Image (spheres, rainbow, N blue to C red):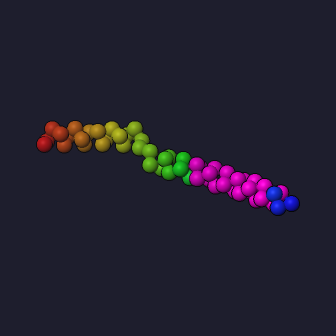
Amino acid sequence: MILYIIVAISILLNIILGIKVIMLQKELEEVKKATRLTKEEVEKLNERIRKLKLGG
């Protein structure tokens, strides 16, 4: 009987942790999207770097 309770708790914890992992993956994907630079931003940064290299 105790074994069934332990198994049930284990399954429940696995489900909860699985849901947490999925939530964290979605959150990570949102952070990646938010921090991703656009092509124009990259071009502007590269241009500024070139100017700094030429000026320095």
Helix, strand or loop: magenta stretch: helix
- Up/down of 32 relative to 46, above or below: below
Residue located 64% across and 55% down the image: 20
The foreground one among 44 and 4 is 4
The foreground one among 16 and 36 is 16
Quarter residue 12 falls in: bottom right
Quadrant showing the C terminus: top left
Residue located 49% across and 47% down the image: 32
- Provide residue 45's location: percent of width, then percent of height: 30, 42
Q: What's the magenta region?
A: 4-26
Q: Residue furthest right?
A: 1
Quarter residue 51 falls in: top left
The foreground one among 36 and 23 is 23
Residue 17 in magenta? yes
Camera sees residue 8: no
- Provide residue 39's location: percent of width, then percent of height: 40, 38
Camera sees residue 23: yes
Quadrant showing the N terminus: bottom right
- Provide residue 34's location: percent of width, then percent of height: 48, 50
